[in-house]
Amino acid sequence: MKRAIRAKRLFDGQQWHNDCALIIEQDSITALLADDAIPADIDCISLADGFVAPGFIDLQVNGGGGVLLNNQADREGIKRMVAAHRATGTTSMMPTLISDTVEQQRTAVAAIQAARAAGNAGVLGIHLEGPFFAPSRRGTHQAEMIREPSPADLKWLAELGSQLITIVTLAPEHMPRGAIAALRDAGVLVCAGHSDASYEQVQQARAEGLRGFTHLFNAMSGFTARMPGVIGAALEAEDCWIGVIADGHHVHPASLRIALKTLPPGKVCLVTDAMATVGDSKDHFELYGETIRLQGGKLINAAGALAGSAIGMIDAVNYCHQTLKVPLGECLRMASLYPASFLGLEGSLGRIAAGYRADLVHIDSAGQVRASWVAGEHSIHSPR
């Protein structure tokens, strides 16, 4: 059945439109037209306030709705994560499993495949963050989980890449020569993170097919005069995508501004690195048997170190626009079109255009998410 959405303002992923409408049929957008051209015989929702934009795509989501994927890797847990983040504008995501056992990796993959098979359109694939990290850069990942990749690990990942959209974050210096190239050829999106690699080691990884960098500036070798490290390599990697956590805690605003000025347009993606507290009334959760608490807007462990974030994608968009003074359209692209491009889905997600999936978000004049559509399915949200 066809239906229409009338908006005073709409961002299609490229440009702004005023007094327009879009037509949805089943799960797809079929037309974008002037609001006075809406056919008289179809149902129409009129949005008087704010604007409509492409739905957000989050490449790194550890949890939400009281669930951490590591603790509840099943269809119900994933459903709760998706619902919690949908209220923040995220219409599709890459649920993320941080460093864990081989058994838990397999369990998480099976749960995500089951969720997709059951029609959960908000789940695109899996992001495996670890466990092949530099121990010195593990952050809050449990030391006992960090290990070197085995031939069996690499074989399994290559098989997974042919079945499911798969991001793997790893330390390039801990990979055998040729392993990144083999994963790339299998369709795996390999990102550098939690790494103490030298600039030269990252360049070798790029030559093999490194696709991106996970949460730039966090848990990676820094930039100095004679040792550019992972950060220096990332800032000149025009062929890679960069994920950043724009929550006001993980990265200094000046560092984010420098990255945005240095990197070419289209390569910086907003991610949340969100944990279980997003969309949940509790201010704490368990990670590896340790209590992580929400204090002053940030999640910290007993030692006071950051342990993921407590934001949704709308918070990252608003931070970039309001604090960093990035134009709103570019903030929206960093949350939708650019992640879609990284995943190779730019022909179906990240824009409002005929033929694209009807993944949309309605944001009011106060920067709050008021409604979303996932594959054409409408949901109304209360201000957070």
Image: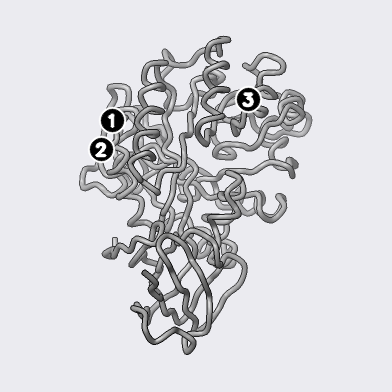
What amino acid is at disc 3? Answer: Leu
Q: What secondary structure is marked by label 2?
A: helix
Crowding around mark 1 (Cα neighbors within 10 Å: few <14, some 14 to 19, many 20+) is some
Q: What secondary structure is marked by label 3?
A: helix
Percent coordinates x, y for residue 303 in the rendering: 36, 27
Residue at 38% across, 34% down: 112
Q: Is residue 82 left or right of residue 228?
A: left
Crowding around mark 2 (Cα neighbors within 10 Å: few <14, some 14 to 19, many 20+) is few
For label 2, the residue is 76
Residue 378 drawn above or below residue 91: below
Crowding around mark 3 (Cα neighbors within 10 Å: few <14, some 14 to 19, many 20+) is many
For label 1, the residue is 72
Q: CA separation, marks 3 and 1? A: 27 Å
For label 3, the residue is 183
What amino acid is at disc 1? Answer: Gln
Q: Nearer the viewer, mark 3 or mark 1?
A: 3
Residues tagged 1 and 2 counted as in contact (Cβ below 8 A): yes
Residue at 45% across, 82% down: 8
* Residue farthest toward the bottom in the current orientation of the protein: 36
